[in-house]
Image (spheres, rainbow, N blue to C red):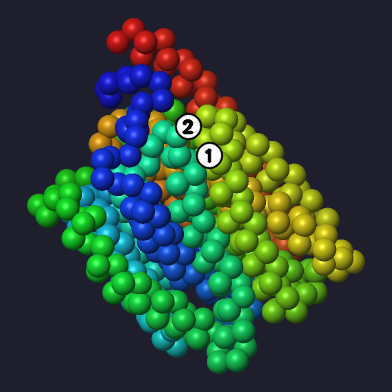
Amino acid sequence: MAPHLPHGQHGVRASAPAGHGWRAVVIIVTAMTLVQAIAALAVLSLPAVAPEVARAFELSPSLIGYQVSVIYLGGMLTSLFGGQVARRLGGIGASQLAMGLAAAGGLIACLPSLAFLALGSFVIGLCYGLTNPAASQLLAKVASARNRNLIFSIKQTGVPLGGVVAGLVAPRLALEFGWQAALAFAVVLALTLACALLGLRRRWDDDREPRARLRSVGLGSAGLVWRLPALRALSGFTTCYAALQLCVMTYVVTLLVSEARMPLIKAGVALAVVQTAGVTGRIFWGWFADRWHSGGVALLLIAGFAVAAAGALTQLSPAWPDLAVYAVLAVLGATGIGWNGVAMGEVMRLSPPGTVSMATGGILFFSFAGVLVGPAGFSLAYQATGSYALTFGGLALLGLAGALCVVAMRRLERAAQPLRTTM
């Protein structure tokens, strides 16, 4: 059984290590944010042009949910040993590997076959499962208890930033050059960043362990999370909200085109609004959690607003003015996409010393499980209801379930405090 530690000291340094000043913080946070952004761009490029892809293959746009599920199947696989990859290659080396996989997956998906589209999506998923464990290993070197949530939240803005680029650029490239151009754009950026990271390896990968064994981990990262009650409850929240987040990012363009009768480019702008709100939300909620010294309270507030916004979209119709559409989507983006940094900060706080990258990989395993079934489940629900707007109402139920998991996490942590104080 893992030892009980003093409250608030689960693997968190009291201050950043000596020699890692603000310049180092800026360098690492910027590098990891870019890695996250390009990985997200690779994931979201196809959903941003789903109507064009569906037209090319003569399929229903609702089936894009299965493509997203294939991506996160790959993510689940690498999340199991992503922490060990980071230990073996170093955080920067693992990030370079992730970018290489994003580029390879994008190139494969461009080949003219549904089988290649599925294979390329799986390889892109392998990339996505490596990004957070690698980043957590690096950010743990520079984060302190005073700025933990904000630092992780800033890094996590990479996901909505990648979504903003996907929403603004991908539809235009698809209409001008074909849907493959959207993926080719992500491929070029991934290869460029992989080369740019070379200059950081000597300093930041000095703790790598070249002999670290990957096969020794197995389900160890997921098992670590499952053995610790508070982390187990947190994994329930991340499972629900990862599913909610990916359903929003996957289907918002299709929702607006199909039921609000928006043109594709305007719907892409709306996706950019969602993602921009996600960037703002992640920074705000990270600041809020640090300011009030409670990631749990921040997660509960996030859940309340996300449930309200998802419920409001059940009433969407072509009669809605654009401003109302953008306002509701902004709230949903700031919450349904804005939760990640605070959740990653809670993982760092609750993890035993020296296990933050493994615990992050374990949390991601459960999160990706939610994503694996979320978009595909959305597709099935749409086929049953025939309405994208009504199906968005189901996301409110996911939001409520996630809130209950946060309540459980807080209770489990409080229940463990008397044991900790007697150790």
**Nearer to us in this view, 378 or 262:** 262
In the rendered structure, the answer to whether residue 366 lies left or right of residue 286 reads: left
Q: What residue appears at the point 27 percent right and 55 percent down from the top-left corner?
A: 91
Residue 309 location in percent, x, y? 74, 49
The quadrant of the picture occupied by the C terminus is top left
Q: What residue appears at the point 83 percent right and 60 percent down from the top-left corner?
A: 324
Residue 402 shows up from this direction: no
Residue 95 location in percent, x, y? 31, 62
Other-residue count near label 1 (Cα within 10 Å), few / some / many at <14 / 14–19 / ≥20: many
Q: Circle 2 sits on which residue? A: 233
- Between the residue at mark 1 and the residue at mark 2, the CA separation in whole angstroms equals 7 Å
Q: Which amino acid does label 2 sit on?
A: Ala
Q: What residue appears at the point 39 percent right and 31 percent down from the top-left corner?
A: 350
Circle count: 2
Q: What residue type is labelled 1?
A: Phe
Q: Circle 1 sits on which residue? A: 237
**Relative vertical location of residue 288 with respect to residue 188 in this rendering, above or below:** above
Q: What kind of element bears circle 2?
A: helix
Q: Give the residue furthest to the left.
A: 211
Other-residue count near label 2 (Cα within 10 Å), few / some / many at <14 / 14–19 / ≥20: many
**Relative vertical location of residue 371 with respect to residue 260 in this rendering, above or below:** above
